[in-house]
């Protein structure tokens, strides 16, 4: 159903991060944006019109998450990465059923929508149940089927399963293309170069996204660095790069690694919150952006992140960039917001989300301005409005969210899912996992 949204401030998240005043967004019957711009220049419109009072912006794009981990939130919270994985996460995940994954994803999707995140790139298993939960909540997912090669867990059946699924249903499916399928090989320290190259070939042949963890911590890939110099060099020499590749974390990169990514069009999912919590390090964000690498933000999983709040990640990204470069101008509010929107879409190789432009999906977020963060007024200078959104308001005043023009959050709550029931279901799963 078509509609018009009118707001005192609209942030289309174009390349210049424009701030539009007294502007409207028109949504067509197909759920895509028909117009975004000043109300004075808008075409005639006879459909329903909704008056908003705050800031309207695109749905946020979470480029790296393991959202079903809501059932494991807080587990092993003071461990470094490899101990956290081996001692806490992997043993617990081995006990999780498909139903558990569905329960965790449902709450994760609801939580993200309440924080303005309409698209998430998920690396996990039990894909059918994960996708069902995303559709129930009304959000979008880029699902990368987790592929590992561990004792008792061979990699090939996992890869073959997602290949067959893509061949049967296509890359994108569901209402308004809410589902995209792809590959999620875990890392170069879990899978061999030959295996990674074979999976990458399967992904390229289908135009699918290849999501992989790279250089998250210093002690994870010692053998790979000894044999190849770095994981990006390993990926390049093995023929993995090319096509759609998303490198998650990418903390410990050299100048040569950054150049490799730029040369091959690799996207990066920057996860400052998780990297800080696990003491993994600070990614060279400024160097990546200066090299022209497409960078988005990721929350990582809610057992390492822990909050599935992408505007908080935008704030952390700017803070860490300034600290690591000792330059207060290293990353401003506008650039941070673009990482969470347009940049994230580009990192995933998507041109249909992440911005309010004609032809893109009408995934929209309304941030209510009735908050101390906006006490200086929405008529303040553009830079101040953006600063107040990113530095002060964050996601706590997200009140309304639309996906493909459908209102999936109203008054801060899901219109589709009983949040308290979803929370209770996760609590039950968590208690059973602890007891088993």
Image (cartoon, rainbow, N blue to C red):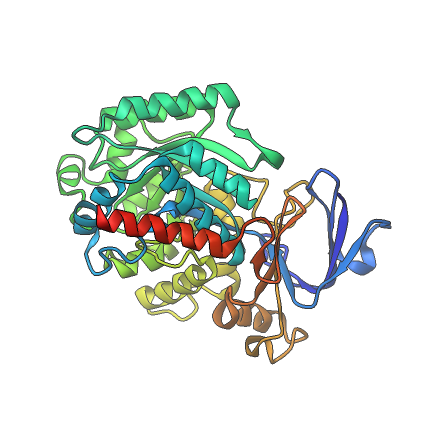
Residue 219 lies, in percent from the top left, at: 15, 48
Examine the rendering and report whether any part of residue 216 can be seen: no
Query: What's the residue at 59%, 57% (across, down)?
Result: 16
Residue nearer the viewer, 106 or 150: 106
Q: Quadrant location of residue 172?
A: top right
Task: Tell whether 232 sits left or right of 289.
Answer: left
> Where is the C terminus found, in terms of image quarters?
top left
Residue 139 lies, in percent from the top left, at: 54, 45
Residue 287 vertical placement versus 384 (above, below): above
Query: What's the residue at 54%, 72% (across, down)?
Result: 388
Residue 9 lies, in percent from the top left, at: 68, 65
Residue nearer the viewer, 416 or 256: 416
> Where is the N terminus found, in terms of image quarters?
top right
Examine the rendering and report whether any part of residue 93 can be seen: yes
Task: Tell whether 276 sits left or right of 169.
Answer: left
Residue 94 lies, in percent from the top left, at: 24, 38
Count of marks, rendered view: 0
Residue 153 vertical placement versus 323 (above, below): above
Q: Quadrant location of residue 41?
A: bottom right
Task: Tell whether 289 sits left or right of 96.
Answer: right
Task: Tell whether 217 sits left or right of 103.
Answer: left
């Amino acid at each position: 159903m078509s509609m018009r949204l009118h707001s005192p401030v609209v942030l289309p998240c174009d390349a210049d991060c424009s701030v539009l005043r007294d502007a409207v967004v028109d949504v067509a019957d197909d759920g895509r944006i028909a117009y975004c711009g000043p109300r004075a220049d808008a075409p005639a419109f006879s459909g329903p019109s909704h008056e908003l009072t705050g800031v309207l912006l695109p749905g946020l794009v979470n480029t790296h998450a393991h959202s079903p981990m809501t059932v494991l939130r807080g587990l092993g919270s003071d461990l470094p990465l490899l101990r956290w994985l081996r001692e806490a996460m992997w043993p617990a995940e081995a006990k999780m059923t498909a139903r558990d994954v569905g329960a965790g994803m449902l709450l994760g999707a609801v939580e993200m929508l309440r924080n303005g995140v309409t698209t998430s790139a998920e690396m996990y298993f039990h894909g059918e149940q994960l996708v069902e939960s995303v559709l129930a909540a009304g959000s979008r997912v880029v699902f990368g089927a987790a592929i590992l090669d561990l004792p008792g867990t061979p990699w090939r059946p996992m890869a073959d399963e997602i290949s067959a699924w893509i061949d049967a249903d296509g890359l994108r499916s569901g209402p308004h293309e809410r589902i995209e399928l792809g590959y999620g090989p875990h890392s170069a320290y879990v899978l061999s170069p030959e295996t990674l190259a074979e999976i990458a070939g399967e992904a390229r042949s289908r135009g699918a996204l290849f999501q992989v963890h790279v250089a998250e911590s210093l002690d994870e890939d010692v053998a790979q660095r000894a044999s190849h110099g770095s994981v990006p060099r390993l990926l390049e020499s093995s023929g993995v790069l090319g096509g759609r590749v998303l490198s998650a974390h990418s903390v410990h990169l050299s100048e040569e690694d950054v150049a490799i990514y730029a040369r091959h069009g690799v996207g990066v999912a920057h996860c400052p919150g998780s990297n800080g919590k696990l003491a993994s390090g600070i990614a060279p964000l400024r160097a990546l952006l200066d090299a022209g690498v497409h960078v988005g933000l990721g929350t990582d999983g809610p057992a390492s992140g822990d909050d599935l709040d992408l505007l908080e990640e935008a704030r952390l990204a700017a803070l860490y960039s300034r600290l690591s470069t000792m330059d207060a101008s290293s990353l401003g509010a506008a650039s941070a917001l673009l990482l969470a929107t347009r940049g994230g879409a580009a990192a995933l190789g998507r041109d249909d989300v992440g911005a309010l432009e004609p032809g893109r999906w009408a995934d929209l977020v309304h941030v209510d301005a009735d908050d101390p963060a906006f006490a200086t007024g929405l008529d303040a200078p553009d830079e101040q409005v953006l600063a107040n959104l990113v530095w002060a308001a964050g996601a706590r005043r997200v009140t309304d969210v639309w996906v493909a023009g459908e209102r999936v959050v109203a008054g801060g709550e899901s219109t589709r899912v009983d949040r308290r029931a979803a929370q209770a279901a996760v609590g039950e799963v968590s208690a059973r996992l602890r007891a088993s």
